[in-house]
Amino acid sequence: MLNTLKADWLSNIKGDLLAGIVVALALIPEAIAFSIIAGVDPKVGLYASFCISVVIAFVGSRKGMITAATGAMALLMVTLVKEHGLEYLLAATLLTGLLQIIAGFLKLGSLMRFVSRSVVTGFVNALAILIFMAQLPELTNVTWHVYAMTAAGLGIIYLFPLIPFVGRAIPSPLICIVALTAFAMIYNIDIRTVGDMGQLPDTLPIFLWPDVPLNLETLMIILPYAVALTVVGLLESMMTATIVDDLTDTKSDRNRECKGQGIANIGSGLLGGMAGCAMIGQSIINIKSGGRTRLSTLAGGVFLLLMVLVLDQWLVQIPMAALVAVMLMVAIGTFSWGSIKNLREHPLSTNIVMVVTVIVVVATHNLAYGVLAGVLLAALFFANKVGHYMLVTSEFDEASDTRTYNVVGQVFFSSSEKFTESFDFKEAVDNVVIDLTRAHFWDITAVGALDKAVIKFRREGAEVEIIGLNEASATIVDRFGVHDKPDAVDQLMGH
């Protein structure tokens, strides 16, 4: 118990607390911006980020991962807020949390094993591009001061770690934010600040139950949005967990993370916040700033609320250019630059999956669509590839007038047509042996192809014998096959 407590909370106190400060500073403008996207008051996003971060620190699985209000989720809320108002959004947030908990108990987090590495790479690259694009409004139609401040911020971020001793002790993004804020205040530079994003809340969040009718009509209104929020939230969280797993060389429990995300979203909805999910950008900031344990996630949420309530007079003066510099660092660090080099080395199908994932995510600004497109493409390419690894050879024994067909490989929907076409049904032989010792039948399409082959041979007057079926294949053939059952020909031909 004590060892677990130390590993989860007390093994990296200094790094976690400093990283939490950086994460909190970066969360504030994003939470405000995402609230504006969703069409709600900035405090809704800020309360959500605080609540979700604190709750997930205790109930989540992935240590060091940051969860808060996100743009991907905010985009799904726009229509609901516009047509029905904030109260229905809070109700949808509660239902989202419940659905995510159910997903955890159904072990849907384990479905991440079907997401190929090329899809993950495409997801990461698309997210890096979206993070970069999100900074462009802050760099468009502005004075030269903004560009100078942003460039100076990037210089501090990348050069400060080179200073002996001190460079590694304090996160460079924190130095960037503090230094540029002080510079802007001292020289009274007219530049866009956090305060220009929207009014910060001045009170603690309070418990409230959504003021909506508890009836079937309300459920029908919020259910489609809750389902969409559940899918996108879990997808982004699971993908982010995979990336943080790689960055920290540790493993997370994805089904527990599903439940944790659900509990956190229920907490957010009960405190007047919107639904959220894991944030890859903030998670990378946390990891690169030295955050490793649950304490960093908790610190990010607690510092966020403290800064908003106690340091609001200073907070509103942080130049957006400083935060843009931090987010540009995240975009640069997030993008898998090696994937560009790998375009020449990896198979064409792998590259297509990665590129399509990027294009769909960037075009739709919806991570779920991109991941879905990538997974479907990867599955099609895999099925096509495995389908080619099926071979049928034959040998003829004149003495017994027997043709033996030897089937090697996987027989399923993709290779079933090739399987059927490999037999010569017009050959005049008395006996046909189909040797399946080195083959495996996967689905009812494969069983149907075997039925068709056997019945066609029998129609031509040959005796057919099937040998070598392994136990798994025999089970599916016995259950769904019709070639040894009465009226087999009529069943197969649909008469």
Image (cartoon, rainbow, N blue to C red):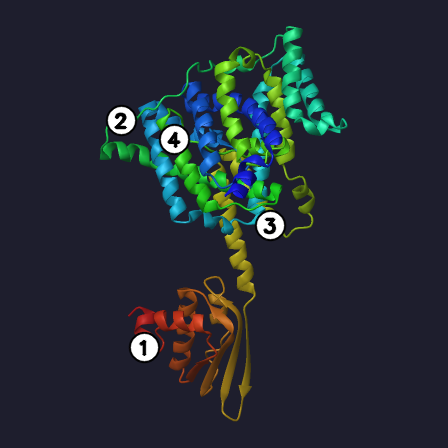
Q: What label does residue 81 carry, if any?
A: none
User: How far, Cα to Cα, is label 4 from label 1?
Assistant: 59 Å
Q: Amino acid at mark 3?
A: Thr
Q: Secondary structure at mark 2?
A: loop
Q: Is residue 195 above or below residue 390?
A: above
Q: What label does residue 267 carry, if any?
A: 4
**Mark 2 vs mark 1: which is more N-terminal?**
2
The residue closer to the viewer here, 398 or 98, is: 98
Q: What label does residue 212 carry, if any?
A: 2
Q: Are marks 4 and 2 in contact (CB under 8 Å)?
A: no
**Residue corresponding to mark 3:** 350
- The residue depicted at 64 percent of the width and 40 percent of the height is 336
- The residue depicted at 62 percent of the width and 29 percent of the height is 14
Q: Is residue 269 visible?
A: yes
User: How far, Cα to Cα, is label 3 from label 4?
Assistant: 40 Å
**Residue corresponding to mark 1:** 485
Q: Nearer the viewer, mark 4 or mark 2?
A: 4
**Mark 3 vs mark 4: which is more N-terminal?**
4
- The residue depicted at 53 percent of the width and 35 percent of the height is 294
Q: Residues within 10 Å of mark 1 (few under 14, many from 20)?
A: few
Q: Secondary structure at mark 3?
A: helix
Q: Nearer the viewer, mark 3 or mark 4?
A: 4
Q: Amino acid at mark 4?
A: Gly
